[in-house]
Amino acid sequence: MRNRYVLVLAATLTVLGVAMFTYKWRVLGFPLTDQQVTPTWTVETTIRFDSGPGSIRVDLQIPTLTPGFRTLEEYSVSRNYAFAINYVGVDRRAQWTVRRADGRQTLYYRIVVYPDRDSEHTDLTPPLPIPPVIDEPLGTAVDVIVSDVREHSADEGSFAAVLLRMMNNPSPNPNVELLLADVNTAAQFVERAILVLNSERIPARMVHAIPLDGQARNVQPVPWLEIHDGESWRFFNPSTGAEGLPDNYLIWWRGNQPLVSIEGGSRLEASFAVQRNVVDAMVIARHRAEQRESRLIDFSLFALPIQTQAVYGILIMIPIGALVMVFMRNVIGIESFGTFMPVLIALAFRETMLVSGIILFTVLVALGLSIRFLLERLRLLLVPRLAAVLIVVVLLMLIISIVSHQLGMATGLSVALFPMVIIAMTIERMSVVWEERGAGDAIKAGVGSMVVAVLAYIVMGLDWLEYLVFAFPELLLVVLAVVLLLGRYTGYRLSELRRFKALARP
Amino acid sequence: MFLLSTRKRLRQAGVLGINERNADYIMRLNPRRYYPRVDDKVLTKKLALEAGMPVPELYGVIESQGQVRHFLRVVEGREAFVVKPAHGSGGEGIIVIVGRSKRKSDAFRLANGLLITASEIEHHISNVVGGQYSLGGKPDSAIIEYCVRFDPMFSEVSYQGVPDVRIIVYRGYPVMSMVRLPTRNSDGKANLHQGAVGAGIDISTGQTLTGVLGNEVVDEHPDTGAPIAGLYIPHWDYILQSAARSLAVTGLGYVGVDMVIDRDLGPLILEMTARPGLNIQIANGTGLAHRLKRIDEIFDPDADPVERARIARREFATEQQRPLPL
């Protein structure tokens, strides 16, 4: 009965912890290690032009809806120019204005994006296009192509695919040849395809994508075809008719507007440069959470002041140490002082480092114990005797610190407030056990405590684990579940297999 | 693989582990609020007397540092006595005085023959009162009581001290028992983890089986060399019945009852514990789990202690001495 409650509770805690963990990991993209980085792409547009005599206005198309990518930041570098971002229809434009400029001018627009598969692609559903009026003889050719393609296709998508395949046929039929008569650029090719699609009343538009590929200068925007099938926008490769947009294509602008336009200047040139960078994955995760307006990030430890974070970095590992303790006690069966004394000793080791900590601890406990036995012969009452031990421990630490400082060793000085209290407590516990159960038991428990402490120290000091628990404190719910389950573990302890081996005769 | 097979064999032998004892028996059957009845030996004594269980006579209780100086008055006219903490556990903090020094008026003789002065005893008492032997160092009181003179039948198998009989009582039924024999190592104390020898007792006959020292099986007393097995515990029926009364006295369903057999007064209840140790299984060469399950099957809420003791004798016969492992 009680077991069932524990099981249900442990299962609930585990599900809760794992669910939160998974959400933060998979959806918000919290990195699993602190070394993890996310690639980002910096795309820089450089605009050069000769200034005219009067005021100058430069408009640049910049990304708005970018399926597959999210914007981390964007900015412009332009001296003396006023910079603004305007929304015009579905376009977004960067605008630089200046009243007067001299000579050749250079403007930069820079955007940093990171890949995000879930980046939504919400777009308006366009109205059905009115069939364009096309001059003869092209009009007839388009009509023939439309009926031809319609015959071979089932819906909007396959219409576009069949059309593009037909247009890309190396030996085109005369109608297609007529359609593509004066086409010189890829953009014009896509425009002709859109003309045919519009004649079939399929909404279609051209998109211009920047391929993000390593480090590259003078990247040319690639025209791509986008059609609307009544439900959503779909991408088609204009040179093959294959559906889809490559993962590394960043959509820069849509429509057949020019990339950049200028008033009051001449010899306008624009070029793209792409650079791959890496950014701490946590920066991206937090940015993503902000974008989604997730409140979870506000409740994470990263929202705390740095100093508080440092304290929690240690505190949050105590449950892990406690788990080690529970495991060592109830599953392995190692004797130790007190319940959580080893965990406290392990914490003290964090300040003294492991090896020097063990030496310091052993020396201090041994000295303290012998002094305690001296005090015992004075027949002092209990509490004054404890106080005397504490004072002696402080004095011993003082001496060790001073001596080690004189010898030029730094570790002695690292004995802090916290380890001191723990050492005094250890000495007292150990001496009580020593008297009550004899030296054997006391030393056994002392060594056991040390073993558990070292183990807890090692586990608590695992950087990846510390990071994991810090970034995903909900994992402590799983730790709690495991501790609850161990609390109902009624099997033998490992040490009992030895203890009762006389009874294990076959 | 080796560990797994050992684990399986221990399960078959019905060996109870610490985790199982704590989770399935102590926590289930021993309500926390009844612990004072066994942890406080003064209270245990009072309750046992009320229930008609025989206990060693109480000479006096020292409850505060101010009363420590009354010690000599408490033991006035007493040759032998025992000082122990009321909340002690595991036989710690106990001093056994077997007589007074003939030459020095304020010196006493310990069980091991050494002399101890009154002021040394007073220091010990003040340590006890200060809480050195109590759980968590809480202030305690010191009990001064009758020193048991043990039955001569044990003289061959104990070294300077009083052997006692430990009986595990489950839901009022005695299920397993052993006699604990002091050794030189245990300093005359009858606690297994202090080095005393434990010898299992056949519940149905009251006859001792082989012994256990530490976690090892022994068949001779390490100091005297006398064989441990085959002794008949006197007053066995009476001991089982007294133990069976512990349920009503303590309200605890899983309890260890410690009794001593006085030369003149017969069996006396020394103390009871809510967390009896598990080495008794080694001493008996068998596990507790099967016997506990058997009691669950035949449990009869209406049976009185005498009846329960009789059923225990019927159920838990040790068929034959198991061969010693080599």
Image: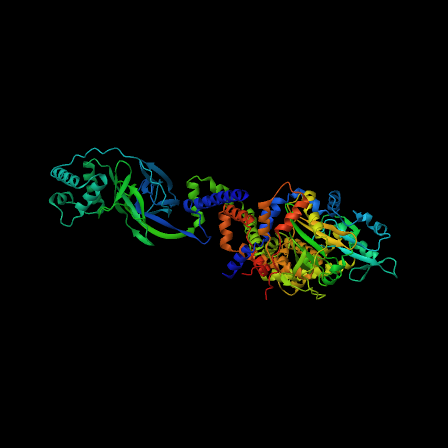
Residue B18 shown left or right of residue A302 in the figure: right
Between A129 and A320, the one lying in front of the other is A320
Between A81 and B19, the one lying in front of the other is B19
Residue A146 shown left or right of residue A384 in the figure: left
Q: Is residue B117 above or below residue A198?
A: below
Between B272 and B261, the one lying in front of the other is B261
- Which colour scheme appears in the figure? rainbow
Where in the figure is residue A291, as x and y percent of width and height? Answer: 41, 41
Is any atom of residue A364 visible in this view?
Answer: no
- Quadrant in which the C terminus of chain B appears: bottom right
Q: Is residue A278 above or below residue A206?
A: below
Q: Residue at x 62, y 44 (%)?
A: B29
Where in the figure is residue A224, as x and y percent of width and height? Answer: 26, 45
Where in the figure is residue B27, as x and y percent of width and height? Answer: 61, 46
Where in the figure is residue A376, as x and y percent of width and height? Answer: 76, 58
Residue B156 shown left or right of residue A269 in the figure: right
Between A324 and A38, the one lying in front of the other is A324
Is any atom of residue A371 visible in this view?
Answer: yes
Which image quadrant for residue A437?
A: bottom right
Q: Is residue B63 above or below residue A127?
A: below
- Count the labels in the image: 0
Which image quadrant for residue A201?
A: top left
Q: Residue at x 60, y 63 (%)?
A: B323
